Image (cartoon, helix red, strand yellow):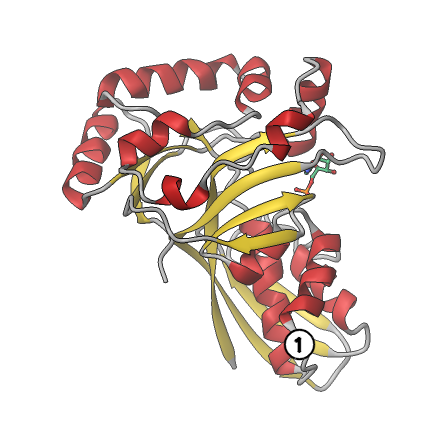
Amino acid sequence: MMRFLSPAKINLHLRVGPLAPDGFHPLLTWMCTIGLYDTIEMTASETPEIHLTCDRPDVPVDESNLILRAARALNPTRGADISLQKKIPLGGGLGGGSSNAASALIGFNQLWNLNLSTEELTKIASHLGSDVPFFLHGPSSICTGRGQHVTPIPRPTAKQAVLFFPNLSMSTPAVYQKFDEMKLGSDAAIHHQPNWQAWSKLGAIDLLEVLINDLEPPAFSLCPELADLRTRIEQKIGQPVRMSGSGSTLFTLTDHRHDAERIATETNLASIPTDVFELAPT
Ligand code: C5P
């Protein structure tokens, strides 16, 4: 049996270009893994079936699950028994399904002795979802195109991500559709590369000040409660708060664990589920 930890991600910075003819939006994003993990256990099977079980009943375990799609993209004739233990919230902009798919690609590659290179796995990953290639590389990378071009950069100096979990699930396609309706997105935003080396050296507050998520305006337009919540948390903790991906998870960054714990205590008092995670763990 093989066991894999499948991490969540946050988008520290997310710039989005105008809708392209392929139906996707070109991106420029800095993603980091965080120390929040699903667990995947895999065993090779004698039969050609892929049998997936999950401890959360709201996770589909049929062919729509990215783990099964990863298996079929690699080899339609091999079988395995897989058990998935979910800790990463669904619909939170934390890339849980994409991370599971990347772990599954790595796992099947080993389990079935396929000997595919990271480059070959990345090509398959990009057809499974925009965030999947990132998880083959991590822990701190710039992703461009639809997410398939991944360039590792130094990890940020900030050590902790404090995550705020609103009880809201955002639909990624709906947020992108709103983005189009609002006529947002410019080529300049995705073609101007910040000085990543300099950004990775900034302290938490200075870094937060320069980070942008172009999906915040459409997400906040679809869900004004999320915008209110962000304002309330910023007022409560006295530092900037950003949204990850298409939402709904909000985050801030700290350089020291005691700051992260103070923030978690303050927001818990405001009854917002909050947790502290290591940023870009190795
Ligand atoms: O790739 P992923 O499964 O995350 O995409 C979900 C949906 O979000 C896509 O079908 C598309 O509608 C939208 N999307 C987009 N541009 C991207 C990523 C996602 O329009 N770069």
| Front position in the image: 148 or 197 | 197
What kind of element bears circle 1? strand
Quadrant holding the C terminus: bottom left
In percent of the image, x 23 and y 20: which residue is there? 238
Residue pictured at 85% horizontal, 33% vertical:
21
Relative horizontal placement of residue 245, taking residue 171 as reference (left or right): left
| 230 to 242, vertically: above or below | above
Dot 1 corresponds to which residue?
80
Total marks drawn?
1
Image check: 61 left or right of 221?
right
In the rendered view, does 251 fall on the left or right side of 124?
A: left
Disc 1 residue type?
Ala
- Residue 141 at x, y = what percent? 50, 51
Please tell me in which quarter of the rendered image ligand 1 is found: top right
In the displayed structure, 274 sits above or below 233; it is below
> In front here: 49 or 211?
211
| Location of residue 116 (image quadrant) | bottom right
Which residue does the image show at 19% across and 27% down from the upper left? 266
Q: Is residue 162 left or right of residue 220?
A: left
- Vertical order, 275 against 61 (above or below): above
